[in-house]
């Protein structure tokens, strides 16, 4: 006579694809690709303060954010249009669906998803405005260093609010990398009474950056990269345009050189945002914030290369220390985003 197992045993034997709502497959290669994306994003970010300082000679910080992100939105729309055209004319439907699986999947705008998108976009806009303001009231070194204090706020918030615990390798890497940042600060950080307001703006922008990273890490489990970018850009445009009117800033650049710098800054924003938001699908917000400790070093290197600013041996040593810290952090399980959807 045939024997039948219990219902529980039969359910346990079913494949996971039946029991779970089609989770994304995450592999080591996807983590390495995400790490490469965030490293490239940090490289681009290191050049951003120099571009902002150059462009702020013609327009104010609020107008600069407005122009930067309407240009970035235009670039994103053009890229999506070209992608849609490619999908339409592609003869290989299987290849097309594989290349565009993320952008073609339907999006369910639940209340929680919309709230996360609004929080992410608001923090993004706030961070951009405050950072631009700080660059007009303090030096590049102070702004870059303090802006990247977000690692402290992100790690603390993940532990206190979301009960996230970190692997010992990650904490060791964090301690080493922060030690490298302190070494860098000993040589570059300058506290002057006239720059205190700019330094405080950089500090608040770092809090907004940490909130943006944490909210984007969670919203990326629900929507694709392009959708997240559109919401962030839209809120940046909507929030900065009234500020421009209130403070009566020059809205658009007045010279060809000014437009050239602003367009480059818009392209910079589009590429940087895509790489950053894409990486947060696979990497934790704390790890991404840790990688951004490389930003002050890269800013210093670009300032030395372009403006001839002094780059001391202590800067290079601090760079090496931060890289050692990142090596330990990369070897930690805390690299991957372990956030579970509700």
Image (spheres, rainbow, N blue to C red):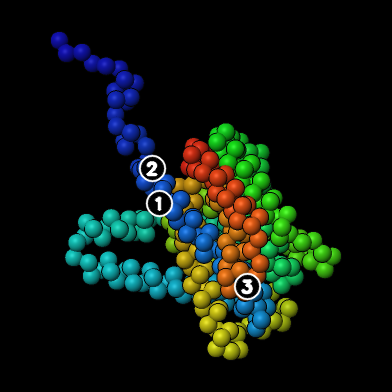
Q: Check the image and name the residue furthest to the left.
A: 1
**Residue 157: in sight, yes or no?**
no
Q: Identify which residue, 179 or 203, lies in the foreground.
A: 179
First in sequence, mark 1 or 3: give its number: 1
Would you say the residues marked 3 and 2 are in contact, meaning their CB atoms lie under 8 Å apart?
Answer: no
Vertical comparison of 258 with 61: above or below: below
Q: Which residue is drawn at 34% across and 21% down?
A: 8
Question: Element under label 3?
Answer: loop
**Residue 284: in sight, yes or no?**
yes
Residue 220: x, y in percent? 48, 52
Would you say the residues marked 2 and 1 are in contact, meaning their CB atoms lie under 8 Å apart?
Answer: no
Q: Identify which residue, 26 or 328, lies in the foreground.
A: 328
Mark 2, residue position: 28
Q: Residue at x 47, y 66 (%)?
A: 271
Q: Nearer the viewer, mark 3 or mark 2?
A: 3
Is residue 72 toward the left or the right of residue 206 in the image? Answer: left
**Residue 172 quadrant:** top right
Res. 33 mark: 1
Q: Marks 1 and 3, Cα distance to the nearest angstrom?
A: 34 Å
Q: Check the image and name the residue furthest to the bottom.
A: 255
Mark 3, residue position: 308
Q: Which residue is drawn at 29% across and 29% down?
A: 14
């Amino acid at each position: 006579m045939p024997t039948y197992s219990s219902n529980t045993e039969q359910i346990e034997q079913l494949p996971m694809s039946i029991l779970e709502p089609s989770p994304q497959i995450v592999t080591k290669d996807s983590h390495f690709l995400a790490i490469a994306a965030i490293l490239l994003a940090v490289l681009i970010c290191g050049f951003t303060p120099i571009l902002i300082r150059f462009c702020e000679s013609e327009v104010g910080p609020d107008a600069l954010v407005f122009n930067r992100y309407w240009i970035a939105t235009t670039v994103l729309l053009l890229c999506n249009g070209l992608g849609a055209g490619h999908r339409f004319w592609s003869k290989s439907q299987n290849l097309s669906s594989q290349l565009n699986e993320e952008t073609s999947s339907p999006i369910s705008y639940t209340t929680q998803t919309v709230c996360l998108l609004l929080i992410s976009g608001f923090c993004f806009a706030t961070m951009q405005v405050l950072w631009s303001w700080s660059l007009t009231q303090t030096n590049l070194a102070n702004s870059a260093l303090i802006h990247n204090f977000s690692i402290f706020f992100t790690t603390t918030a993940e532990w206190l609010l979301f009960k996230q615990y970190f692997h010992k390798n990650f904490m060791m890497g964090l301690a080493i990398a922060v030690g490298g940042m302190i070494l860098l600060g000993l040589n570059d950080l300058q506290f002057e009474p006239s720059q205190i307001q700019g330094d405080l703006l950089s500090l608040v922008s770092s809090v907004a950056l940490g909130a943006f990273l944490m909210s984007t890490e969670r919203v990326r489990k629900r929507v694709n990269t392009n959708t997240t970018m559109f919401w962030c850009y839209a809120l940046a445009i909507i929030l900065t345009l009234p500020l421009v009117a209130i403070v009566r800033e020059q809205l658009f650049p007045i010279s060809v050189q000014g437009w050239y710098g602003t367009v480059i800054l818009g392209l910079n924003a589009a590429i940087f945002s895509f790489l950053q938001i894409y990486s947060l699908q696979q990497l934790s917000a704390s790890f991404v914030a840790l990688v951004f400790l490389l930003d002050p070093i890269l800013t210093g290197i670009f300032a030395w290369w372009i403006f001839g600013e002094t780059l001391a041996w202590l800067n290079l040593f601090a760079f090496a220390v931060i890289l050692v810290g990142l090596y330990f952090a990369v070897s930690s399980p805390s690299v991957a985003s372990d956030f579970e959807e509700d």
